[in-house]
Amino acid sequence: MPVTYEEAGVSVEAGYEAVRRMKAYAEATFDSNVLQSLGSFGGMYALGEQVLVSGTDGVGTKLKAAFALEKHDTVGIDCVAMCANDVVCHGAKPLFFLDYIATGKLVPETAASIVKGVADGCRQAGCALIGGETAEMPGFYPAGEYDLAGFCVGIVDKAKLIDNSRVRAGDTILALASSGVHSNGFSLVRKLIPMEKTKLEEYSAELGKTLGEALLAPTMIYVKPILSLIDAVEVHSIAHITGGGFIENIPRSIPKGLTAKIEKSAVRVPPVFRLLQRLGELDEAHMFNTFNMGGGMTVTLPQAQAEKTIAHLGANGVEAYVIGEVVCGDEGIILC
């Protein structure tokens, strides 16, 4: 029987309803410097001719794999990636980062290992780790477990701010290759693959590595390649493919009246997603609405600049390729 995200304990509809209910409370605090409503990849606040762009997120239940394998030095990279990648979607350069670690019993060695990963991620994103909070809450978390979240602030000139207002019909949509599952969809992953040390240490010939190595691969941080790209070509919009996969995130980078037409056959799907699809008996629609499917970020730009963009990103260590185009319509996204 197919296993759905909701059966894994995550209600997408409840998420929509929660945002709907929260939106009015948040917007009641806005002043004239706030540049967006809820739904942008980053929160944007204008300061004269510059804009601060902020993002906050956590690693989520990917941490269960880290607990099982007692490997804590890479989840900090995930934490930075989830925040900094959102910030760079608007063309902003991340300035600084703060982390939050909460645990039932503080183990100094574990905390240091986590923060080492956060620092590694900050170096990749080109931002400073300027502080954070470590909360010890006895009885609140099971032994050996913790939660990890973070907050990132970046800056961009107002004239260079990237939203979706420049997107036009005929624009090309490129996918930037991911490093694997990244940090979303793990509630479903855990339903399909037990987060147990012996299971995660099993070697998978299909993956060419152990299950744990595949699942704990740190989230790709796209900040430096994207900032370099923005200086080289005309970028119209960017989407960070996180929770909700292609279906929820690509439309956020496309304005009303236009639609992203995505060729599923063009998406270069890594083996880990084929494995998860088979284990869960999941259809393609469910996969593209849950996982990044190998495309951790998308960039929308004029078709004439696609080839130059692919070459530029490749020279900066990121595989990029065409997956679709922008067409007229109100669907938001079409998978064909």
Image (cartoon, rainbow, N blue to C red):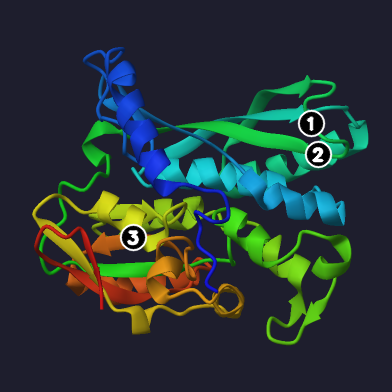
57 relative position to 193: left or right: left
Closest to the observer, 102 or 303: 102
- Label whose residue precedes the other's in the sequence (3 or 1): 1
Question: In this figure, which residue is indicated by the disc labeled 3?
Answer: 247
SS label for mark 3: helix
Quadrant where the image shows the N terminus: bottom right
In this rendering, is residue 102 above or below 84?
above
Give the distance between the C-alpha atoms of the residues marked 2 and 1, in whole angstroms.
Answer: 6 Å
Question: Taking the image as drawn, is residue 73 in sight?
Answer: yes
Q: Where is residue 94 in the image (x, y as percent from the top left)?
A: 49, 37
Q: Mark 1 is on which residue type? A: Tyr
- In the picture of the structure, the residue carrying the numbered disc 1 is 141
Report the residue at 62% width, 34% height from top: 149
Q: Name the residue under label 2.
A: 145
> Depth-wise, is mark 3 or mark 1 nearer the camera?
1
Q: Residue at x 69, y 44 (%)?
A: 76
Please name whichever residue, 76 or 120, is drawn nearer the observer in this view of the structure: 76
Kind of residue at disc 2: Glu
In the picture, residue 311 is in which quadrant? bottom left
Secondary structure of the residue carrying numbered label 2:
loop
CA–CA distance in space, label 3 to label 1: 33 Å
